[in-house]
Every structure is written in structure tokens, then in C-alpha cells.
Amino acid sequence: MKSICLSDKLDQDHLLTVLASLPQANRYLIACSGGLDSSVLLHLFHSVSKDIESEIGVIYVDHGLHAESENWGKHCASLCEDYGLKFISLKVAGSPDKGESIEDWARQQRYALLSEYMQQNDVVVTAHQLDDQLETFFLNLLRGAGARGLSAMPVIREFANGLLVRPLLPFSRAQLEAYAEQHGLKWIIDSSNEDIEFDRNYLRHQLLPVIKERWPSYQKTIARLISQQAETRQILDERAERDLECASISGSVGLNFSVVNALSDARKKNLLAYWIKRNGMSLPNAKLLEQILSDIFLSSPEKSPCVNWDDVELRRYGNQLYLMKRLADDNNNCILPWDIESPFQFNNQSISVVKQQGDGVAASFMNHNQISVRFRQGGETIRPYPEGKTKTIKQLFQEARVLPWCRQRYPLIYINDELVAVPGICIDKKFHADANQEAYHFIWSAQEQSVQAHD
């Protein structure tokens, strides 16, 4: 990715400079709320649209938190009609849990919807500006964030299937207001932005004006500090990337525990934070990082410790560390019928079949019989091809190094009431096709992540 020489002038040339630094985009997806910031961003994109080869789309996310949210969406749609831009409206389902931060919930839901909508090499463009950046810095500071948090928001970062770009970050709210007035823009004023019950609004209306009165140039000072923290973050990330390369295990999603454990505590925490962030998961706070060092790295070798936060789990098994989304509760008592003409979908996973000669379940057994997917109950046995010696599923999973927390979630393929296959591991000898027979080979999308690779 090219380096960016950001302009200090808010105009079309600045936007084109930012876009020119990016890889070729499939689409630019502009996040628009109808407020001042996104109205300026939308106008800028409209003014340079003839110079952009990629498709431009505008996305409005309705969080359902305000009585006027539907009308705001209509306002955005009207702007897009005037500008000749494609408009997309996405609606958040559900509501925050009792006691949950509305701001955090709304942000998580918004980004989740955007990431789901994105295609490969799409670029999401948001209208965050300098005042947002400073507010984020102070919020992270008050939450005890380190260099990663104090570097606040980058202009460009990887996101879902492409990138997230914030071209207005160098400019203040006052500069955006001047641009909007110059071009006669109209925008929505969200009354909830005045509610100081929200942390960001409290900072904006109560604390930062007091700081500005005492230190008028604080914005430039903090912006410079953010830039310095970003450089520190880059150094930390480069160190973490080298540590990650050393700790990675070929064919495994896990890390080598012994390699990570040999690092100093500071480098352990740096590596873990980088690894977690790189996997798109929420970072643990400083207290949880200390708990990880204690519970994961100081526990006895025979244990399989786990530390979780939000929807994330960090586990250790044997000599490997595993990072994953928090596992859903077991529901392994069900029998799930499967029409093998289509992939079987469950828990964001799939089982599909490939027709081939010889290696698989003989097609003659599959035809006109009931195929189902089930899960381990205890006591199941199978006679793996070619030996045909009876083994329990428990034995089979131990030999195949299936991770303990995956064993109750590992799919088993049945014909009528007979266990015929364990995807990725074995097929029962009775049902295995001869070399010249048509056969069905099962492929489970999560099989690789469910088995421990050799160190």
C-alpha cells in the first residue's frame, strides 16, 4: 500500500490522494448517517465520482434507537438520488442488553452489518474526523489503554473482506462546518448527541471545552501524540509479527505454547494482543491480560485452561494455544436429517459431499436411505476402513487429536441408525466403497480447526 501525504486542505484533491493510495477497490461503500460529517463526505465523493472507476454505494445503518431513524434514512436516500449514487439501507436487529453500553453495542452492530454486506476488495469509507479522533483518544486514555488504544483510529485499516478508510481524520468539525456552509449542504441534527449520559458526549460538551479554554492548541498537541503512539504501535506490531512467525505451527490455527512462554511477559502480552486483533476479535483489557498470563501460562501441563471475555475464548491444550469465538452451548441430542444434494449447514459450518471413485461411502448405501447428522452421546463405535477393528468414538478422537472442546460438536454421519463416517477421520469398513465403485466423500468445513496439529 502506498504511503499517504495528507493535505491540510479539505477538498476533492485530498480525497483523491487518499483513494489513490489504496489498492483497486471493487466498490466504495460510504457509511452515511445524514449528519454533518457524512454529508460532507458524501458531497466530496459526488464531486469526484467522474474520476473514480469503481462503483460507489452509500449505506445507511438504522440502529432502531431513535424515533426519527427511519426519516434519517429517507433523508440519506434523497441525497443519493440527487447525487446519482446507489443507496442501501441496513437495519440492526435486537437491542442492547440491560446494563450494556448503548454506544458500544451500536458500534458493534453497525460494523457487523457492514462486514456482512462487504464483498471481496470492497472499501468501507466512514466520516470520522479530528474531533472524533481526539474523543477516542481521551476515552481510551481514561479506560487505561496502552499504545494501541492511544494511537486511536488509523486513516486506513484492514476490515472484513477489504479495507476501512477514514479520509476526513485530519480535519476538525469546524473545518467540516465551513465546507458544508460553503457548498450549501443541509444535514440532520441528532438530538441524542447532546445527551451527556453518553461518555463521548460528556467528553465533547463538558471536559474538552474546559481543556481548550486552558490549552487552546491542545488539538494539535494531542494529534501529534496520537501520531507518535501510532509509530510506537507500528514498532510493537512489527515485533509481534516476528514473534508470531516463530510461534506459528504449520497446519494449525494455534500457537506453540513453549515458544510463546519463552518470551518476556511484556512480549507475551504484545504478541497476544496482536494475534487477537489480527483475528478480528475484541481485545481483553489489561486486567484480563494479566489473568491470561496467570491462568494460561502458569497452570500445570495436564490442565486445559480457558480465559474468556465478550465472545472470545483463549485456550491451552497440550503445547498449543487456541483463539476462538466463544462456543455455543451443546445441543448434541438432536438427529438432523440431511438431503445430500445440498451442503448441510449448522453453527456457521457446513458438510458437503464430493462424488468420486472408491474413496468414500459407497453410493449404493446412500441411495434411498435416510441420511442424518448426529453428535457424540457416548458409547458409539465404528470399524475404521481398512483394518475394520472396532473402536469407540472416544478412542478415535484421542488418536486423531480432536480438541477436547470440539468432541461433543464433531458431526457424525449416519445412514438410518448406523454410524458410517466421521468426516476427515474415517469411514466404517462395511460402508466403504470398492476401488471401482461410485462413492461419496464427506468434507466438513471446520475439521482442520477441530484437530490439533503436530508441533
Image (cartoon, rainbow, N blue to C red):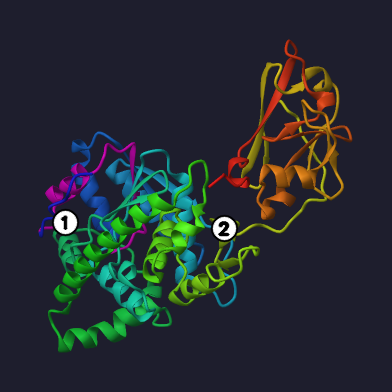
Q: Amino acid at mark 1?
A: His
Q: Is residue 148 left or right of residue 179?
A: right
The residue at the point 16 percent across, 60 percent down is: 179
Asked where in the image residue 87 lies, by quadrant, the reply is: top left
Q: Secondary structure at mark 1?
A: loop
Image location of residue 173, percent across then percent down? 22, 68
Tell me if residue 75 comes above or below residue 162 in the rendering: below
Q: Which residues are magenta?
A: 9-36
From the viewer's side, name the closer residue of 91 and 391. 391
Tell me if residue 412 comes above or below residue 319 in the rendering: above
**Mark 2 nearby-residue class (10 Å; few <14, some 14–19, many ≥20):** few
Image location of residue 11, percent across then percent down? 13, 53
Image location of residue 312, percent across then percent down? 55, 61
**Residue for badge 1:** 183
Q: How many marks?
A: 2
Residue 320 disc label:
none
**Residue for badge 2:** 93
Between marks 1 and 2, how big is the CA–CA gap? 36 Å
Q: Nearer the viewer, mark 1 or mark 2?
A: 2
The residue at the point 77 percent across, 25 percent down is: 386
Q: Is residue 73 left or right of residue 96?
A: left
> Quick one: which residue is furthest to the right in this view?
417
The residue at the point 47 percent across, 71 percent down is: 289
From the viewer's side, name the closer residue of 403 and 24. 403
Q: Amino acid at mark 2?
A: Ala
Ranked by sequence position, the earlier of labels 1 and 2 is: 2
In the image, is residue 72 part of the stretch drawn in magenta? Answer: no
From the viewer's side, name the closer residue of 214 and 345. 345
